Amino acid sequence: MQDVKLALIGAGGRGAGMAGLLLDSDRPVTFAALADPLEARRVRVGEKLSVPPEQRFADHHELLAQCRDLAGAIIATDVSTHAPVACACLEAGVPIYLEKPMTRTVAEAQE
């Protein structure tokens, strides 16, 4: 069975934890890319997830522009960024798993 290629957007504690759980499961998952504004987290979590250095991005826009063959993205950023990040992924054709809460407001969720 072929690995499912995912991206992690938000490599803080929650994102790294969710990614680690997937890697520790029996599911065929590969983290092909990650995005996080903090370089230290990109390096630390990227190494833990075996994401190549050239596939570690400072923001999700760079990731989405350069990674075209993703099966999905886990979004584990601050809730204030959930709606714009989720919309950018969906507009790029990348299915998402969105950490809760989904958004700050009903209007953002409906968008």
Image (cartoon, rainbow, N blue to C red):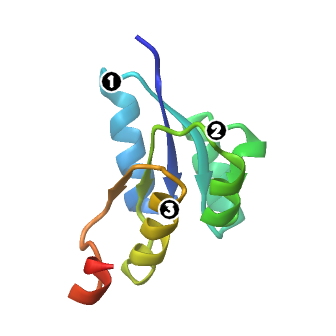
Percent position of residue 19, x then y: 41, 44
**Badge 3 density bin: few <14, some 14–19, many ≥20, Cα 10 Å:** few
**Badge 1 density bin: few <14, some 14–19, many ≥20, Cα 10 Å:** few
Q: CA distance from mark 2 to mark 1?
A: 17 Å
Percent position of residue 30, x then y: 50, 30
Percent position of residue 10, x then y: 50, 62
Where does label 1 land, which residue? 27
Q: CA distance from mark 1 to mark 3?
A: 27 Å
- From the viewer's perspective, is 88 left or right of 75? right
Q: The N terminus is located in which quarter? A: top left
Query: Of discs 1 and 3, which sits in the foreground?
Result: 3
Q: Quadrant of residue 108?
A: bottom left
- From the viewer's perspective, is 91 left or right of 67? left
Does residue 33 appear anywhere in the picture?
yes
Residue 80 - label: none
Percent position of residue 2, x then y: 46, 15
Amino acid bearing label 2 = Val
In this view, the residue in front, 70 or 18, is 70
Looking at the image, tell me whether mark 1 or mark 3 is earlier in sequence order. Answer: 1
Where does label 2 land, which residue? 51
Does residue 10 appear anywhere in the picture?
no
Amino acid bearing label 1 = Arg
Where does label 3 land, which residue? 91
Label 1: which secondary element: loop
- From the viewer's perspective, is 56 left or right of 20? right
Q: The C terminus is located in which quarter? A: bottom left
Question: Where is 80 relative to 8, above or below?
Answer: below
Label 2: which secondary element: loop
